[in-house]
Structures are given as structure tokens and as C-alpha cells.
Image: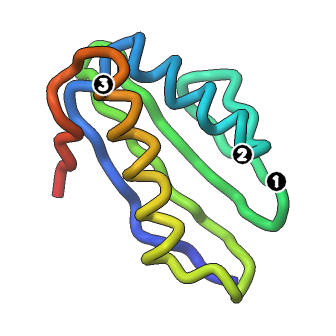
Amino acid sequence: MSACGMQSFANVTADVWNCCKSKASSYGVEIGSDSGSTSSHGFTVSWNYDASSQVLQLQVTDKPFWAPCSLVNSKIHDAVDECYANHGASGASMIA
């Protein structure tokens, strides 16, 4: 088991953040605060949402061996993109 690279997203409005929390819940990951960490189904996810700068950072810090980071991070990125689209926010601006 190993950590995947952190993903950072800009222009995350409160509506987009709420959508992201709802999407995470649909995967069994409960996010109840703007910063924290939780584990579910062999995955551990940590996050930090800064409402004042509208920056969201997400990282899978532990995962099963069978789940490559490329797939895990792609699924996270797709979910955030969908939340941007659903709430009329500008595209998922990843921060390097």
C-alpha cells in the first residue's frame, strides 16, 4: 500500500465543495469537515478545503495494491470536473 500524489484544485466554490463531499459519500467516503482524513474500503483519503482561497487539496494516502494511483487520481479528477460542470464553475483548474 502506498500514497498517491496530492491533487490541488483552484476555483472551488462552496457549491462545488458540497458536490465533491456528496460524490465522496457515494463512494463510501464521509467528509464532514473542511480538513481531515478518513478510511473506507481499504482507501485512506485526506483533504483540505480553504474557502477563502477556494483551493481544494485531495490525496489518497493509502490504498490497496490492486488500485494504481493513475486510476485513483483519474477518478478523483473526473468527480471534481463533474462538480465544476454541475455548478457552473470554471473548469477544474489543477494547481501543479
Residue 78 screen position, x and y as percent = 40, 50
Give the alpha-carbon distance from disc 3 to disc 1, as whole Å: 24 Å
Q: Indicate the secondary structure of the residue bearing disc 1.
A: strand
Query: What is the C-alpha distance between the residues marked 2 and 3?
Result: 20 Å
Label 2 environment density (alpha carbons within 10 Å; few <14, some 14–19, many ≥20): few
Q: Residue at x 41, y 63 (%)?
A: 74
Which quadrant holds residue 53? top left
Total label count? 3
Quick one: quadrant of the C terminus? Answer: bottom left
Residue in the image at 39% along x and 43% along y:
57
Q: Nearer the viewer, residue 92 or 55?
A: 92
Work out whether residue 95 or residue 76 is closer to the camera in this orientation and state it. Answer: 76
Q: Position of residue 64 (x, y in %)?
A: 74, 79
Q: CA distance from mark 2 to mark 1?
A: 9 Å
Identify which amino acid the numbered label 2 is placed on: Tyr
Residue 65 is situated, as x and y percent measured from the top left of the image, at 70, 88
Q: Is residue 9 above or below residue 87?
A: below
Q: Which residue corresponds to mark 1?
A: 40
Residue named by callout 3: 12
Secondary-structure class at tag 3: loop
